[in-house]
Amino acid sequence: MATLPHNDIFQLVREPIDTVALAGVVRAPEDGAVVTFDGFVRNQSHNRPTLYLDYEAYESMALTKMREIGLQIHEKYRIHRVAMVHRLGRLEIGETSVFIAVSAPHRAAAFDACRFAIDTLKRTVPIWKKEYFEDGAVWADGEMPPAPAATPRAKPAS
Amino acid sequence: MPPVSQTIRVTVFFFGRLKDLAGHAEDSAEFSDATTIEQLFALYAARYPELAKYRSSVVASRNQEFAAWDTPLRSGDEVAFLPPVSGG
């Protein structure tokens, strides 16, 4: 794998995410701000009490898509570093499922990049969660990633 | 000379709800003629009719990039059928 520019971090993990450590890792003397997003397991879904969640991923593609988001936010915003970690497997109420930290010289870029990163992750990264309730389990409603339209083709020469 | 028929062998992954409906996460398929992702899905939809109901919400990938349904398959491709994503 090619070395990533910017020393960014993109990971899928099965252990608890150390949010404090990640927020520290992106922080450098030339920065003036770190914005973090901590997504964690809610105790209910549509007013139904949740017992726990189980996340799965198309891991190789998910990491590719996470790295693409990193490259996109470096292009779009004046930021320094990104850490983006998603946890897989069984997660209990209150546990962090996704954590994003973005450092930047100034806060506006860090806020904007962090927001763009989580919104894009939720729309394009192939990860799925199954919600477990007292009376059964369902795959959570998701978002359809934007897929390429049918390929326009030149008419075959006859 | 007639074209030499070449076997196209692909690996197929199902995720989330689609994995439950297909009963397995991974399969391999072989074709002797040109085949698109759409035709590959139709093959599984015929085998597992429940899958067909979800066709309009499925997105396909080829070699870990989102792919159009009319994408032709090449031997060695890795195709995945992805239900709406719900990470985060």
Image (spheres, coloured by chain):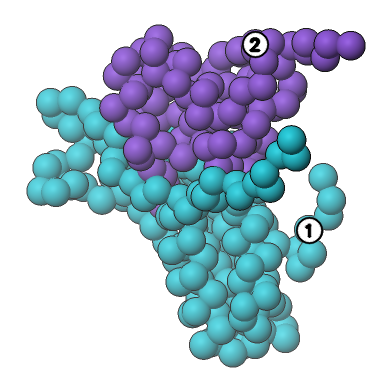
Chain colours: A cyan, B purple
Quadrant, the C terminus of chain A: top right
Q: Amino acid at mark 1?
A: Leu
Q: Is residue A103 above or below residue B59?
A: below
- SS label for mark 1: loop
Q: Amino acid at mark 2?
A: Glu
Q: Please name the residue shown 12% across and 42% down the image.
A: A48
Quadrant, the N terminus of chain A: top right
Q: Please name the residue shown 39% across and 18% down the image.
A: B45
- Answer with left or right where residue B42 lies relative to residue A62: left
Q: Please name the residue shown 14% across and 49% down the image.
A: A46
Front-most of residues A128 and A31:
A128
Which circle marks residue B30 in the picture? 2
Tell me the mark number nearer the camera, choosing from 1 and 2: 2
- Answer with left or right where residue A120 lies relative to residue A92: right
Q: Is residue A78 above or below residue B28?
A: below
Image coordinates of residue A64 in percent, x first then y, are 65, 48
Front-most of residues A21 and A127:
A127
- SS label for mark 2: strand
- Answer with left or right where residue A109 lies relative to residue A95: right
Q: How dense is the environment of label 2, judged by Cα within 10 Å: few (below 14), some, or many (20 and up)?
A: few
Q: Within the image, what quadrant is residue A119 found in?
A: bottom left
The residue under label 1 is A4
Image coordinates of residue A130 in percent, x first then y, are 32, 34
Q: Is residue A60 visible?
A: no
